[in-house]
């Protein structure tokens, strides 16, 4: 098992090195000023952006779930909205009755 992991790690390192060499070669052929380090930085930025978008989707999903739960509670008449006015400011408060899910 240890040999298998060592072989996998070695193959991974070789592939990474080959990818870097390929990127350098492509940049040289295009006579681009961008080197492989810039490409790595661009890749990291793309990964961060993808993670941020995934987090946004997850957050949106949570809000949708909360919205559905609030609608269910409202239909079951276990959710009411109370309105308060303090110093010319109006506040609406959601009141959820004590229920078991």
Image (cartoon, helix red, strand yellow):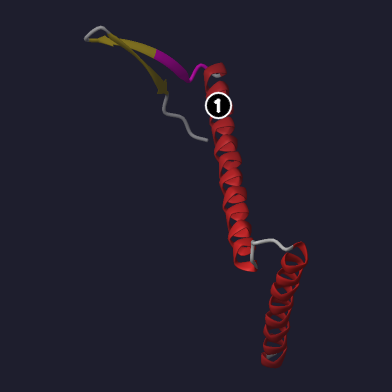
Are there few (<14), some (14-19), or many (20+) residues within 10 Å of tag 1?
few
Q: At x 70% / y 92%, what residue is drawn?
A: 3
Q: At x 74% / y 77%, what residue is drawn?
A: 18
Quarter that holds the N terminus: bottom right
Q: Residue furthest left?
A: 87
Provide residue 87's location: percent of width, then percent of height: 21, 9
Span highlighted in magenta in the image: 77-81
Q: Residue furthest bottom?
A: 3
- Give the vertical position of 41 relative to 85 (above or below): below
Secondary structure mostly seen in magenta is: strand
Provide residue 2's location: percent of width, then percent of height: 66, 91
- Give the vertical position of 24 relative to 73 (above or below): below
Provide residue 56's location: percent of width, then percent of height: 57, 40
For residue 75, what is the image quadrant? top right
Q: Which residue, given by chain and number where applicable, does mark 1 sit on?
A: 67
For residue 13, what is the image quadrant? bottom right
Question: For this rendering, which residue is in front, 11 or 93?
Answer: 11
Task: Answer with left or right where residue 26 lies relative to residue 36.
Answer: right
């Amino acid at each position: 098992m240890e040999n298998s992991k060592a072989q996998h790690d070695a193959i991974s390192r070789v592939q990474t090195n080959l990818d870097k060499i390929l990127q350098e070669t492509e940049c040289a052929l295009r006579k681009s000023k961008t080197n492989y380090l810039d490409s790595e930085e661009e890749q990291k930025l793309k990964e961060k952006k993808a993670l941020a978008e995934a987090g946004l989707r997850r957050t949106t999903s949570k809000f949708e779930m909360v919205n559905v739960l609030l609608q269910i509670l409202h239909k079951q008449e276990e959710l009411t909205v109370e309105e308060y006015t303090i110093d010319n400011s109006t506040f609406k408060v959601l009141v959820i009755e004590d229920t078991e899910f």
